[in-house]
Amino acid sequence: MKATHTTLKHIRRSPYQSMAAVFIMMLTFLSITIFSFLVFGSSAVIEYFESKPQVTAFFKDEAKSIDIEGLQAQLQQTGQIASTRYVSKTEALQIYKEQNKNDPLLLDLVTEDILPASLEISTYKIEDLEPISNTLKSSPYVSEVIYQKDIVSTLASWTNAIRIIGITLIAVLALVSVFIMMTVIGFKVSQKKEEIEIMKLLSATNWYIRWPFILEGIFYGVFGTLIGWLVASGALLYATPYLETFLKGIPILPVSPVFLIGLLGIELLIAVLLGVLASSLAVLRYLK
Amino acid sequence: MIKLENVTKAYPTGNTALADVSFNIERGEFVFLIGPSGSGKTTLFRLLIRDTVPTTGSIRIGDWDLVTLPHKKVHNLRKNIGMVFQDLKLLRDRTIYENIMFPLEVGNMDTKEAKERVDMIIDRVGIADHVNKFPIQLSGGELQRAAIARALAFNPEILLADEPTGNLDSTTSWEIMKLLQDINAGGTTIIMATHSADIVNSLKKRTLVLEKGTLTRDDARESSKHDDSVGLEKDNIVEETKE
């Protein structure tokens, strides 16, 4: 209790130094939160695409159901198929009607005959897409094959880049915040040299002197983290309606509160470690 | 109670602050420590509160062996030895009350108990009117009382006072001396470093004289037993202090 009281007094009596320490921690944890959103978000998008029917084969009109079943059985034998779904001409028309129900003109023009039947195939692994699509292309009944390999590989490389940039930036910011906190706390220790000397002469243990400074480091870490996390999470919640429109059909929004709280928990743990590290370094450096 | 045997303190610079000093102080004694500036008085006090260790020799205070005392236990020793520093070392950003409370806070004493103790000490040293002031608002004599009050916080067995009357006028000096004598009468052993010949000669207490780090005299005489003068010429001391 006394240590906490002393810590709060230290903070109150040098508000600008304390603010600098809190802001740099906030910046670090704002970046950590934003990059966590980006990395987890893009990973979820990739996962979504990877779990969806990734190859769609459209059949020629002359393809009979027995031919299609044969092709389906041939694909199943490869062992690479997670699931297949046959969409008949009738179903295709229903889907088409559903998608364009607000546009009667488009509905009038289209009949069951002009829509192709199709087979949606999802694989276990993304790299199996290519052989499957080649098999489909070689079939005489298939008129066209489309798959999302490009989307996924583009996304994967983006995610990778975000991860690398994020980790680098966070590492640099974390290092800078440790140095800044160390300087701020070190400065306070040297300001209090006389008081510390008196404390020692009056039978204070080393830990009695150190604790308030260590707690100060933890305070900067925790306070900075809370602000950084609140800003980033607030921005995400605010942007959720727009992002939902943009990411239509990909079920990653709204972000679960469990994820946000979990992230905060991990960040607080990191913040406490950084705070303790910085203040311990300062105390070791200036309090011999 | 305090026993020094052949204590020498030499600094790496080659300067010898104390050379082969031995003496024994019994519980409840009042001892003056005199000698010119640089004669080793402050070094002796620093040795007694274990702020430094002797180069050779042994120091014992009660059951404590100060030479072998581990660093971790020094704070326990310092609870038993109150020290009034020459430059007082009061914390400027705390009130007198907080300054007196400070060692108890540092020593983790229960707050209620600590407050009771501080109130008692404040009455004893007579600074009740100034407890809520900051050191800068007090006169020399009041500051000295505050420093003595803080030194008494743990009710120590030994009180070391380094020039407690150094910067005070004669009247105030005698008030402080009266306070110290009262404390001594309560059973506390007191060692007081001073330059004041008046005080030393008037009180007729045991006097240790340090010159250039060597103990040149130890008048182990008690005023009750020896009513004759301790024999310190006032002029001698003044001359010594001028050196």
Image (spheres, coloured by chain):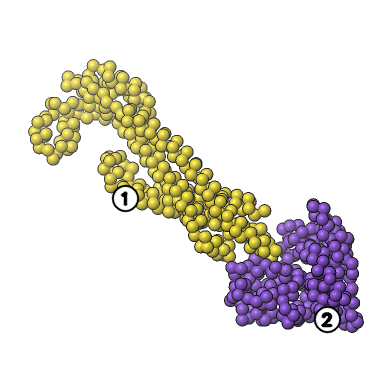
Chain colours: A yellow, B purple
Residue B130, located in which quarter of the rendered image? Answer: bottom right
Q: Which quadrant, please, contains the N terminus of chain B?
A: bottom right
Residue annotated with mark 2: B202
Q: Residue at x 43, y 54 (%)?
A: A227
Q: Nearer the viewer, mark 2 or mark 1?
A: 2
Residue A241 in the figure: left or right of residue B143: left
What residue is shown at x 56% (from left), y 50% (from top)? A182
Q: Nearer the viewer, residue A235 or B130?
A: B130
Pick whichever, A60 or B216, lies toward us: B216
Q: Where, by quadrant of the figure, is residue B175 drawn? A: bottom right
| Kind of residue at disc 1 | Tyr
Percent x, y of residue B142: 66, 77
- The residue at 18%/31% (across/down) is A92
Vertical placement of residue A183 versus B110, above or below: above
- In this rendering, position of residue A77 left or right of residue B98: left
What is the CA distance from the residue labelled 2 to the residue labelled 1? 84 Å
Query: Which chain hosts label 1?
Result: A
Callouts 2 and 1 close, C-beta under 8 Å: no
Residue B174 visible within the image: yes
- In the image, taking residue A39 as reference, residue B238 lies left or right, namely right
Q: Which residue occupies 65% across, 69% down? A: B90
The C terminus of chain B: image quadrant:
bottom right
Q: Position of residue B59 (x, y in %)?
A: 83, 62
At numbered mark 1, what does the secondary structure look like: helix, strand or loop?
helix
